[in-house]
Image: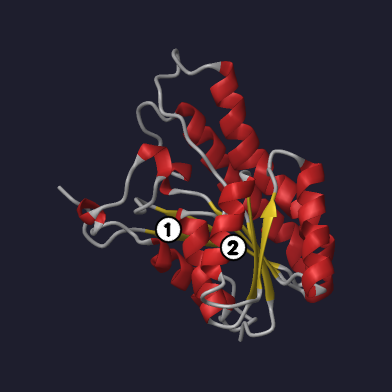
Amino acid sequence: MIENKVAYITGGTKGIGFGIAKILLENGASVAFSGRQKEEVEKIELELKQYSDHILGIVSDVKSLESEVEAVNRIKEKFGKLDFVIANAGMGVFKPVDQLTAEEWNDMIETNLTGVFYTLKASVEELKKTEGYYITIASLAGANFFENGSGYNASKFGVVGFTQAAMIDLRKYNIKSTVIMPGSVATHFNGNVPSDKDAWKIQPEDMGNLVLDILKMNPRVLPSKIEFRATKPAN
């Protein structure tokens, strides 16, 4: 179902993005992924080549529309088309609202929310050609507010609303859109170092398998919003 398809994953050098890239490569897709650090992108590109040679690492910052346009141009040059876009890049700063700085607020909004718009804006004409799929990675924080989460909650609530509205705009082109809202994932997010204590959490490969399942669904159905949780959270 996804063989000979081309996917672009933002924030693909670690965690969720890496897990999605690995699963899609193993199942026959060509994958481009982006990250902001050149050395890290080159390292992960080499690591992912063990699963498939159909891999392209791109240095790009989702906070820049021009950077995302250039990323899509590179994908077209290498693979000739673009079928799937997974807007995954994100970051978080967790502080009381009175201690959150304007710089931290802007960094979260520009990365987590404006970034998903820029990624879609840069790729939408290619997705029209392939009647492709646009997936955003939000969070359960996009439906549930919590202490010290004002900036992060705002960005993720925005991603959920943006993707749902974009779904309505894009379906007339036969482009499908899904927002995934994971709970706790065993990644390096917010300074965490994954270890055995994270075994209860969603694993990056679980996210990859979920994306694979979505992309393989019959074209007549659309899971437009998915909440994805660990079965039994740690006490």
Q: In this rendering, does residue 173 appear at all?
A: no
Do the CB atoms of the residues marked 2 and 1 lie less than 8 Å apart?
no
Q: Quadrant of residue 202?
A: bottom left
Q: Quadrant of residue 129?
A: bottom right
Sort mark 1 into few (<14), some (14-19) or many (20+) by Cα contacts within 10 Å. some
Which one is in front, 161 or 101?
Answer: 101
x and y percentages locating residue 195 in the rendered image? 25, 53
Three-letter amino acid code at the position of disc 2: Glu
Q: In this rendering, does residue 52 appear at all?
A: yes
Q: Residue at x 45, y 18 (%)?
A: 97
Q: Is residue 6 left or right of residue 49?
A: right
Residue 149, placed above or below residue 140? above
Three-letter amino acid code at the position of disc 1: Glu
Q: Is residue 224 left or right of residue 144?
A: right
Quadrant (top left, top right, bottom left, bottom right) of the N terminus: bottom right
Residue 207, placed above or below residue 162? below
Residue mark closest to the camera, 2 vs 1: 2
Q: CA distance from mark 2 to mark 1?
A: 30 Å
Q: Residue at x 68, y 39 (%)?
A: 114
Which one is in front, 9 or 154?
Answer: 9
Sort mark 2 into few (<14), some (14-19) or many (20+) by Cα contacts within 10 Å. many
Which disc, if any, is residue 106?
Answer: none
Q: Secondary structure at mark 2?
A: helix
Q: Name the residue carrying label 2.
A: 45
x and y percentages locating residue 175 in the rendered image? 73, 69
- State which tag comes first along the sequence, 2 or 1: 2
Residue 160, placed above or below residue 191? below
Q: Secondary structure at mark 1?
A: strand
Q: Name the residue carrying label 1.
A: 227
x and y percentages locating residue 31 in the rendered image? 64, 69
